Image (tube, rainbow, N blue to C red):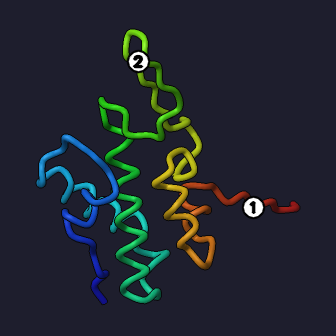
Amino acid sequence: MALSLPTVEDVRAVIETEATDTQVQMAIDDAALVVEACVAALPAARQEAIIKYVAAHFLSLGSKTGSGALSSQSLGDASESYATSILGEGLAGTEFGKRALLLDPNGCLARLGKRTVVFQVL
């Protein structure tokens, strides 16, 4: 069964990005491929929400502008700093990824990319 995907406008509603509509659509398509096994059995609205936040997560990783949470701001010499993702943290590395993790009722997204270790006694 096909996944229920968010629209480009849905993703743009949660992340300010300079990406083109084509690039946002590519992020949506990539997000759907990554999370497909985790969300296939979930209701359509939850599928769309998870994919939307994973797509925003991907877009924020490639952003050259501050797309993370505002972490500091100054008035003199007008300076702003934004939080950036933490390499190796996976989805937990951005606020968008954290939202996707919260929406996953089975914890499947948290296990993506982690290796399974098998011990055998010889």
From the viewer's perspective, is 36 left or right of 108?
left
Q: CA distance from mark 2 to mark 1?
A: 50 Å
Mark 2, secondary structure of its residue: strand
Q: Residues within 10 Å of mark 2 (few under 14, many from 20)?
A: few
Q: Residue furthest front?
A: 75
**Residue at figure coordinates x 40%, y 51% from the top left:** 57
The quarter of the picture where residue 116 lies is bottom right
Q: Which residue is mark 1?
A: 118
Q: Residues within 10 Å of mark 1 (few under 14, many from 20)?
A: few
The quarter of the picture where residue 56 lies is bottom left
From the viewer's perspective, is 102 left or right of 28?
right
The quarter of the picture where residue 46 lies is bottom left
Q: Quadrant of the N terminus?
A: bottom left
Q: Residue 20, percent across and down?
A: 12, 47
**Residue at figure coordinates x 31%, y 81% from the top left:** 3
Q: Which mark is residue 2?
A: none
* Amino acid type of the residue tagged 2 in the rendering: Ser
Judge depth for marks 2 and 1 and give the one in front. 2
Q: Which residue is mark 2?
A: 79
Q: Residue 26, percent across and down?
A: 21, 56
* Amino acid type of the residue tagged 1 in the rendering: Val
**Residue at figure coordinates x 27%, y 75% from the top left:** 5
